[in-house]
Amino acid sequence: MLQHAAEEAIRGLEEAGIDFVSGLPDGWQRNVHELVEQNDSFQYVPACNEGAAFSMCAGAWLGGKKSALIMENSGLRVASEYIARISLGTGVPVTLLCSYRGDVGETEHWGVPHGIVAEPLLQALRIKYLVVRHVEDLCPAIKRAKRLSETQLHPAAVLISGDCVWDDGGES
Amino acid sequence: MALDRYDWLSRLASRIPEDCLVMSTYIGAVSFEWAHHTNEHPRTAHLGQMGDVIGMAVGLALALPHRRVVCLDGDGSVLMELAQLVAMGEQSPDNLVVFVVDNGVYESIGWGEHGRRATATATTVDLAAIAAACGVPYTVDISTEDQLVAEIDLAFSRNLCSFVNVRTEPGHSHVQPRRTDGIEDKYRFVRYVERLEGIRITGVPPQDIGLMKKKDG
């Protein structure tokens, strides 16, 4: 993610009151993970897959933490088993920050399937989401996603793409 | 050699500290018998399912580092998501001890004329060895009552992230199934944690707060 966008993501997490972050770093949000790790506002618990990360976020919420899971949208597929079991089954909120690989503008062929699956999968899991393509929208989107998550006791998501990750001026 | 599940869960239930929290699998004989032995005490979150019980216990233990957390899981569940053991080893919370009911079968699915369906622990897999390889500081594989007594003593007399794999005989539940679902179990546990810790986990709608009469001054 562009550095000023990553800093906006951190501001959003802080202002949302998130204090427990897990996830698996990816190419776009690697710097977000680094900023989280360096920030004392967050208890940072990296994982080796997004399913275990979601489980830890859910367990932390049961202990009073406000949890966020940071991952590529491919990780949604891995986490979906535990989102379904835990959140659809018992009602546990976790805020999801997902790189939107495969969005319009994608440069990597391997990102295309992630873009095809992500939104239908979120809908299948009854997870409301915002797609953020402008840096100035990132902080409020994270705060609103967290707010909804806590209100409905179910995850809410932010898919991040566009000007947050590409400094291309829209050139092809 | 292996232990009787009902008996060893009873022994564990009689020894767990009053002020600890328990993350347990929420369906199957383990949950039914644990609930029976503990009189459905709300300190137990019957919320874990296949592949997520240890992960949730790690998250809970990290969120409340001053609070001892006991985890009850089964071999099929641990096998489903070994990344949980990676997380447990990487984080190694001192306040977490995991007991695994390792009966070597998928008990909850029932059985037919050819008997029960075996898990990999019945033949090739050693869960305690995997946990050790993931970096869990203390792991042990036990199958006798004397070992169980000793491990329960150890688990509750020190602060060390531990994984105790208990070889267990397969067998029917000795008690009736539980009647609650995950939603009720969650609220019961959350309200207990809120009282125990003096914290709020679920919120109050701002509009509702606005209905309160403001105090003068």
Image (cartoon, helix red, strand yellow):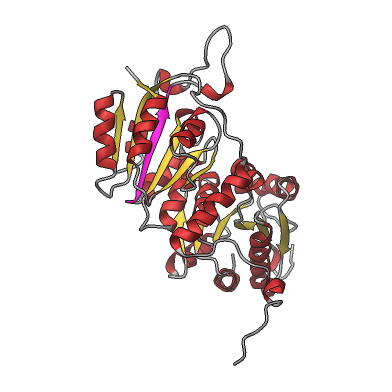
Would you place residue B214 above or below residue B79 in this image?
below
The reply to whether residue B14 is visible in this rendering is yes
Q: Quadrant of residue B104?
A: top left
Q: Nearer the viewer, residue A134 or B28?
A: B28
Residue A113 image point, x, y percent: 70, 44
Within the magenta stretch, is there residue B137?
no
Task: Name the magenta segment's main secondary structure.
Answer: strand
The stretch in magenta equals B94-103
Q: Whole-percent x and y of residue A97?
A: 61, 59
Residue B37 picture quarter: top left
Q: Residue furthest bottom?
A: B217
Q: As drawn, is B126 to the left or to the right of B73? A: left
Rendered-image quadrant of the N terminus of chain A = bottom right
Quadrant location of the C terminus of chain A in the rendered image: bottom right
The residue that appears at 48% across and 23% down in the rendered structure is: B174
Q: Residue at x 50, y 34 (%)?
A: B31
Relative to A96, say whether B170 is above or below: above
In the rendered image, residue B100 lying in the magenta stretch gets the answer: yes
Q: Nearer the viewer, residue A91 or B36?
A: B36
Q: Looking at the picture, how far across and down is residue B92, in whole percent?
A: 35, 49
Camera sees residue A24? no
Q: Nearer the viewer, residue A151 or B91?
A: A151
